[in-house]
Image (spheres, rainbow, N blue to C red):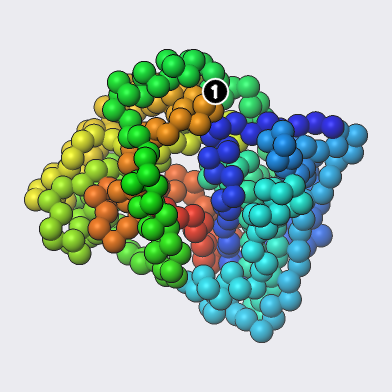
Amino acid sequence: MKTWKLSPVDLFTLGMTIKGAWVYERMPEAEKLKNALAEIATTYPYLTGKYDPETKAVIWEDTAVGTIPFEEINAQGHRVADLCGNPRLAWSLVKPYDAKGFKSGKAQPFTAALAKLSDGVALYVQAAHAVMDAATFYKIVEQWAELSKGAGITPMILDQSLLPSPDAWSKEETIAKVVEQGWVKIGGKQALKMLWNLAKNNAVKETVSIEVPQAEIAALRKESGAGTHGVLSAIAAQKLYAHLPKRKSFKYITVVDMRDRFKGIDANFMGNISQAYQIGGDYELSQSVGNLAAEIADETKRFVSSEAPEEMLRLSVCASGYRLPYFLFDPSDMNNSNPGTIYINNLLKFRACEIDWGFGLPVYAFPNDLTDMVKFW
C-alpha cells in the first residue's frame, strides 16, 4: 500500500468539495476521454485511493493502477443554451460529489462525468478539496485535455515533505509567536457567531454576479497604477459597502497561492498550498475606487514581497497541528449580514475558460462554488 499523508493545510479543507463544469459544443468521444483519464490515474495514483480517517492519509494499492470514476449521462432533453448561465440546471444533471463518503473512506477523491446534450456536452469534474487547491484542480483538467489531444504533459510534483512542518516550532513557541503577531483567539463568542453566520449562509441559495467591462478595468488600471487584482478588489469592496452605508472602513483578506513563494515549492507543486491572508490594516471607504485600488495594490505588493507570508504559513500549520485556538484573522467578521471584512479569491490566473479539448473553447465555464465571499472569474 502507498499513502498520501494529509497535512494541516489539507485537513483545514476536509469536507469541502472543489468542482468545475464546462459546456462545449463538441468534445472528444467518451472512450478517448476515458483513456486520457486513465493516464491521469497512472500519473497521479493517489487520485484513485481512499481516505483513511485513522491515519489521516489517502491510501492506494501500489501493485496495480486504479481507475478514476467517470460517468456518462444522457441529457438529450437539454440544449447548450439551456445550461449556460444556469448553474442550478447544470448541476442538477450530475450527482453531487460524496464529500461525506470521502471523509469516511468510502469515496475516491476525484470524479468526472460527461453529459450528452442535444447539441453539445457538459463536462463535470469534482474532487475533495483536501487533496488539492484550485491551482492543482485546474491543472489536472488542463492536463487531461492535453492528453485527450494526444499531447504530452509535465507531471506535477507529488511530494508532501515539501510542505511546512507542523512542529517547526514547539507548542509554547507557536503560542508566543501568534500572540506577538496579534492573531485572533477564537473564543466562545466568535465560535457562536461563526455558527450563526454559517446557518444563515446555508439559507442563501443564490450568489450575485457582476460583470465588469474590460474598458472600465483598463481605465482604472491606468488611473491607479494597480493591476487587475487591485482594481477588481476595490470595485468589489465599493459595491458591497454601498449596501452598508454605516461602514466607514473594512479589512481585506485575499487568497495567496504560495507556489514560488514558499521555499522549496515551485509552480508545479501538486496539492494544497494556498493561504488566506489579511493584507494591510483598515481601508477607508471614503476614497475613490482608483485610490482604493492603488492602496490595495501597494499593500499587497509590500506583503507578498516580504518574508511574512512564508512565516505566517509555517505558524498557521503549527497552530493547526497543535489545535491552538488562534487564527490569522477574525473569521467571524465576514460572511454575515454586516461584514467588517471582505474575503476575496481570485481565480483569473487559472484560465479555466481557455481549456480546449481539440474542438475549440468552452461556450460556458462555471466557477467552483466554495463559500468564498467574493470570487473573480
Q: Quadrant of the N terminus?
A: top right
- Residue 130 against residue 180 in the figure, above or below: below
Secondary structure beneath label 1: loop
Amino acid, disc 1: Pro
The picture quadrant where one finds residue 362 is bottom right
Which residue is found at the position 44% from the left and 16% from the top? 172
**The C terminus: image quadrant:** bottom left
In this picture, residue 322 sits left or right of residue 3 = left
Residue at (54% x, 18% y) in the render: 167
Furthest residue in direction right, as rendered:
63
Relative to 109, does residue 261 appear above or below in the rendering?
Answer: above
Q: Indicate whether 344 appears above or below 318.
A: below
* Residue pictured at 49% horizontal, 46% vertical: 350
In this rendering, the answer to whether 78 lies above or below 69 is: below
Q: Position of residue 183 (x, y in %)?
A: 33, 30
Q: Residue at x 39, y 32 (%)?
A: 326
Q: Nearer the viewer, residue 188 or 8?
A: 188
Q: Residue furthest front?
A: 188
Compare residues 32 and 162 and report the one nearer the observer.
Answer: 162
Residue 17 pos. (x, y %): 58, 53
Number of marks in the rendered image: 1
Q: Is 347 positioned to the left or the right of 225 in the image?
A: right
Position of residue 94 measured from the top left corner of the image (x, y, whole percent): 66, 69
Q: Is residue 222 visible?
A: no
Residue 290 position, x and y percent, is: 15, 47
Residue where numbered disc 1 is placed:
166
Badge 1 density bin: few <14, some 14–19, many ≥20, Cα 10 Å: many
**Residue 81 visible:** yes
